[in-house]
Structures are given as structure tokens and as C-alpha cells.
Image (tube, rainbow, N blue to C red):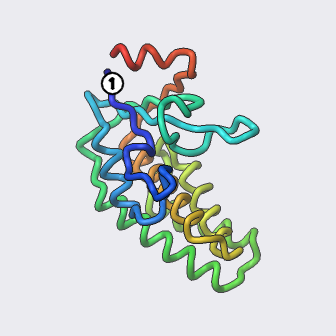
Amino acid sequence: MKKIFTAGQFPANEHGEYSPAGITPAEYLEKMYSNIEEGELCIAKDADDEGAVYVTAAALSDAAEVCRYTVDASKADAAEIARKEQKLFDACKVLAALCVEEKDAMTIVKSAVEAAANADGLRFADAVVRAQRIEKLLRLGAPEVIIAGERHCFAEELALNAIASSCEAIEKKDFSCLQDA
């Protein structure tokens, strides 16, 4: 059976559910990287009510699809990605506090991500979008648990930007091919 990264690999909260609160981006990345197997990383992804796939699923049974990435495990440095994520998160906090116009903030955040990530990397555009979402959530005063979840998604995008070279989306009806591998 192939390893598939799910949020359910983290401890449950008092309600028996996964919660991003209390899990640092570095811990999230370490757990994600522990699922790399033979140059592949499979991540179960959940969908929202409109069907947009956007977060790591709690369990394979909750997943809308599984993204199978071809990765270079030698580049999987969780501490380095966590440092980049923290630096960019801190920049977003400063920017959000300055009350810069949204259009200008998006441009500034994109430039900061360009300086920290590989602009030619597989998940670069998604890393930019996640950073921009963080800045907006901070500006709007979103609850910490929402920001923590978004930080995990951002760290994941930065990590995939650094290590992934290709991605194949496997639909729910085809999950059995992963379980038999």
C-alpha cells in the first residue's frame, strides 16, 4: 500500500477532528515529507462545496482526489522551507498592518514570494496565491485557526515548489490503484 499524506496523520483535537491549531508549519512539512516514497509524494486533497480542490483531506475516504507528485527527496529540507514560510508570513503581517491598498499588497506579496521561491517551480503560482490569501486574512483579522490552516497550505506549496517536478491527479474512483501499489 502506498503512503498517502492526509491531515488525519496529526493528533485529533478534543472533538476528534484534525485542527491546524498547535501544529507548526515545520511539523506539518516533516509529516508531509515522511510520506515520500520512491521519489513520489501522494497527498489526499479535499474539495469545497463548489468542488474546488484546495486542502489536505482528513482521510483518504474524505478526498476528492489524490495528487501524486514526482519529487526530488534530496531537496526535502523542512527546516529551510519553514524558515522561508516564517519570513514571508512575517512580511505579510507587516504589510497587513500598513493598510496598503489590496492591489498594491498583492503585487508586493508576489514580489516577496518570487524572491524566496523558484519562479519556474511546479507550484509557484499557487504559493503566490496562498501568500496573498494570508496577507488578506491578516488584514481582515481572521481567527488564528484559519490563519494556521492557510499557513500549512502555504508551506506545502513552498515545499512542492522546491521538490516537485510533476503532478498527476488521481480521481476518487481510481484510488484503488494507489492502495494496491
Q: Return the x and y of residue 83 as percentages of the image width and height.
A: 35, 67
Expressed as whole percent of the image width and height from the top left, the position of residue 128 reads 58, 56
Residue beneath the point at 56% across and 78% down: 93
Residue 23 percent across, percent down from the top left? 40, 61
Point out the image quarter for the N terminus: top left
> In the displayed structure, would residue 160 be above or below residue 142?
above
Q: How many numbered discs? A: 1
Residue 118 at x, y = what percent?
Answer: 44, 52
Identify the residue at image location x=36%, y=62%: 82
Most foreground residue, 158 or 59: 59
**At label 1, which amino acid type do we have?**
Lys
Which residue is at 73% across, 40% downward?
A: 49
Q: Is residue 47 left or right of residue 11?
A: right
Please identify the quarter of the rendering in which residue 133 is found. bottom right
- Please state, as top left, top right, bottom left or bottom right, where the C terminus lies in the image: top left
In this image, 83 relative to 47: left or right?
left
Pointer 1 local density, CA inside 10 Å: few below 14, some 14–19, many at least 20: some
* Circle 1 residue: 2
Q: Is residue 6 above or below residue 130?
A: above
Viewer-proximal residue among 67 and 80: 67
Residue sitting at the far left? 74
Q: Is residue 54 above or below residue 171?
A: below
Which quarter of the figure has residue 172? top right
Label 1 secondary element: loop
